Image (spheres, grey):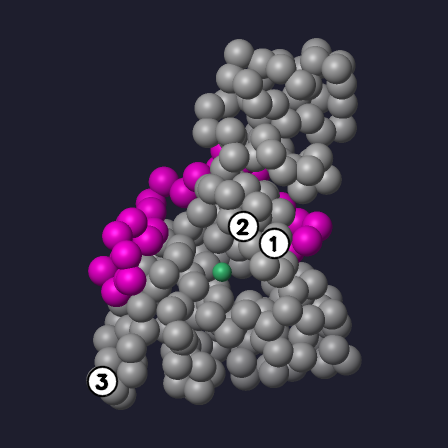
Amino acid sequence: MTRSAKPAECLATAFGVLMCCCGERVASAPGFETCADLPEEATSGIRPAAPGECEEIAVDLLRLVDETHGVPFDCVPADLVELSQATRRGVLLRREAAASFEPMAAAADDAGLRIEANDGFRSVQEQCAVFAKKAREGIAAPPGFSEHHLGLAVDIDDAPKRWLDDHAHEFGFVESYPAGAESCTGYPAEPWHWRYVGPAAAEIRRRGLIAHEYLSGRSCRGTPLEP
Ligand SMILES: [Zn+2]
């Protein structure tokens, strides 16, 4: 990484793509090609990790990721595994989340319902492509600000919402963007998007919180944060 860039130098590199933030070059690696077509405001949050930051993220199941709390582009989980209960090949989650997702899918199957993942881990680079596509259809998190970067969030195809509402917490999953919490989460309801938080899922449910309140430590719907 070079830290000497002036704004004019941010337009060209050996790789043809360069993100600029705060007057510094932050990303000039291959793979950012899809980011180059996005407006500058969509890519201004792309940044590398501070020393030790990736190591912190790697062991943190309760990392808050929202419109203002991002994930560095170079913090790719080392323990990603492929889900077998998925609509396509290559849907990845961190090992612990995958180890809970598979039995959740099996339990749903026992109830005559189907749970299949159609998306899991996404790199910041991949989020550029998603953002470019979804920005035309509706809202999508800018690159660097998606829970999918953690390898803990899964999108479930045609999610059996009522069953998940009753049982997902038993497997450590919570709904990140519930209906009625748009002003808290910053996003419209996404009943297909579930986040692994481990044992905290049961506590979040018991206390009547949404995940964002628990992870941020801030009540945003008038719900007392203390039990
Ligand atoms: Zn999602």
In the rendered view, does 214 fall on the left or right side of 220?
left
Where does label 2 land, which residue? 133
Magenta residues (range): 66-92
Amino acid, disc 1: Arg
Counting from the top left corner in percent of width and height, residue 79 is at 33, 45
Circles 2 and 1 in contact, beta carbons < 8 Å: yes
Counting from the top left corner in percent of width and height, residue 189 is at 60, 72
Label total for image = 3
Looking at marks 3 and 2 on the same chain, the residue that comes earlier in the sequence is marked by 3
Counting from the top left corner in percent of width and height, residue 27 is at 58, 25
Q: Residue at 71% of width from left, 29% of height from top?
A: 21
Of residues 136 and 35, the one nearer the viewer is 136
Looking at marks 3 and 1 on the same chain, the residue that comes earlier in the sequence is marked by 3
Where does label 3 land, which residue? 110
Amino acid, disc 3: Asp
Amino acid, disc 2: Lys
Mark 3 or 1: in front is: 1
Counting from the top left corner in percent of width and height, residue 219 is at 73, 72
Q: CA distance from mark 3 to mark 2?
A: 36 Å
Image quarter in which the N terminus is found: top right
Q: Residue at 48% of width from left, 66% of height from top?
A: 193
Where does label 1 land, which residue? 136
Q: Quadrant of residue 113?
A: bottom left
In the rendered view, does 163 fall on the left or right side of 16?
left
